[in-house]
Image (cartoon, rainbow, N blue to C red):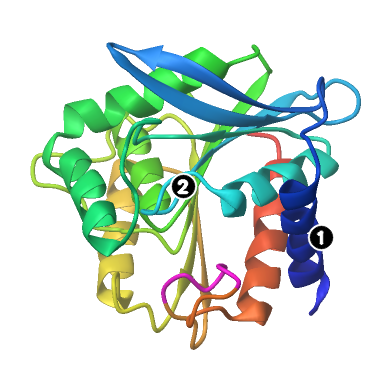
């Protein structure tokens, strides 16, 4: 199960040593109101019929999401890693991460605006569009699902699973895939069971894959929670989900 680790290591080294190839990969900026945001766009060889929008963890858009976008492009998908904090956000440690995520958790309307405007600014009109995210990004994905974003699928990797008071999944328009660890201390199995009940009651097509012993951030190489087997299996589940027609 060394494949994902080797691919990510190669991609991170490439990002650190090479200029991004024009026409295939690019870092772009866009405006939401008075603030500037960035996105990394990875284009595949040929024409893609599906775009995957990736939302970052709580520490902002970095080489991790860029690496995942490149991996998706290698599979033939157009991938866009979005920035929800803005280019001027100070992200030097846990206090900064809590501040930036806290702003959006407290203002759900702004949370949704940053996701939807980011998608609009980077859209290329592909036939299918998927929203995926890691940790904080997984919670953002579910926010988009509850908001009724007109997308074909929503994928949460070890994301926050709780539903804010007053929200539900009655407007969800796409399928949902939950990739979660059984030992996640942030969103436990009770949270997962509650969400599955909500999705069932709302009539939302959904699938959950649970990885035994996996904790929070099990896909993040270098973190104390990284679990290679769960990383590999969840990535394959993601690719299977993308290959299925909505």
Task: Tell me the quarter of the image containing the N terminus.
Answer: bottom right
- In the figure, is residue 43 to the left or right of 91? right
Q: Earlier in the sequence, mark 1 or mark 2?
A: 1
Single out the residue that lies furthest toward the bottom: 213
Front one among 41 and 54? 41
Which region of the structure is painted magenta?
A: 216-221
Outermost residue toward the right?
46
- Image quarter (top left, top right, bottom left or bottom right) of the C terminus: top right
Residue 218 shown in magenta: yes
Q: Nearer the viewer, residue 26 or 233?
A: 26
Q: Quadrant of residue 37?
A: top left
The residue drawn where x is 82% and y is 20% is 23
Q: Residues within 10 Å of mark 2 (few under 14, many from 20)?
A: many
Would you name the residue on which mark 2 appears? 56
Residue 79 is tagged as none
Tag count in the figure? 2
Task: Residue 217: give x, y in percent of width and height.
Answer: 47, 70
Residue located beneath label 1 in the image? 10
Q: Tag 2, which secondary structure?
A: loop
Question: Magenta: predominant secondary structure element?
Answer: loop
């Amino acid at each position: 199960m060394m494949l994902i680790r080797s691919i990510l290591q190669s991609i991170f080294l490439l990002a650190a040593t090479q200029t991004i190839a024009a026409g295939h990969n690019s870092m772009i900026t866009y405006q939401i109101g008075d603030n500037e945001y960035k996105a990394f766009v990875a284009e595949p060889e040929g024409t893609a019929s599906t775009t995957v929008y990736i939302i970052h963890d709580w520490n902002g858009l970095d080489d991790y999401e860029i690496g995942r976008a490149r991996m998706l492009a290698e599979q033939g998908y157009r991938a866009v890693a979005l920035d929800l904090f803005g280019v001027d956000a100070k992200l030097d440690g846990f206090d900064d991460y809590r501040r930036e995520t806290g702003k959006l958790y407290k203002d759900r309307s702004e949370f949704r605006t940053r996701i939807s405007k980011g998608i609009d600014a980077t859209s290329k009109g592909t036939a299918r569009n998927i929203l995926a995210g890691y940790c904080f990004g997984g919670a953002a994905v579910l926010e988009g699902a509850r908001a009724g974003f007109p997308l074909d699928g929503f994928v949460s990797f070890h994301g926050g699973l709780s539903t804010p008071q007053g929200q539900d999944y009655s407007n969800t328009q796409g399928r949902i895939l939950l990739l979660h660890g059984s030992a996640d201390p942030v969103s436990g199995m009770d949270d997962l069971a509650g969400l599955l009940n909500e999705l069932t009651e709302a009539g939302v097509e959904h699938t959950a894959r649970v990885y035994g012993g996996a904790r929070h951030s099990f896909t993040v190489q270098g973190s104390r929670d990284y679990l290679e087997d769960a990383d590999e299996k969840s990535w394959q589940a993601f690719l299977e989900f993308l290959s299925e027609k909505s």
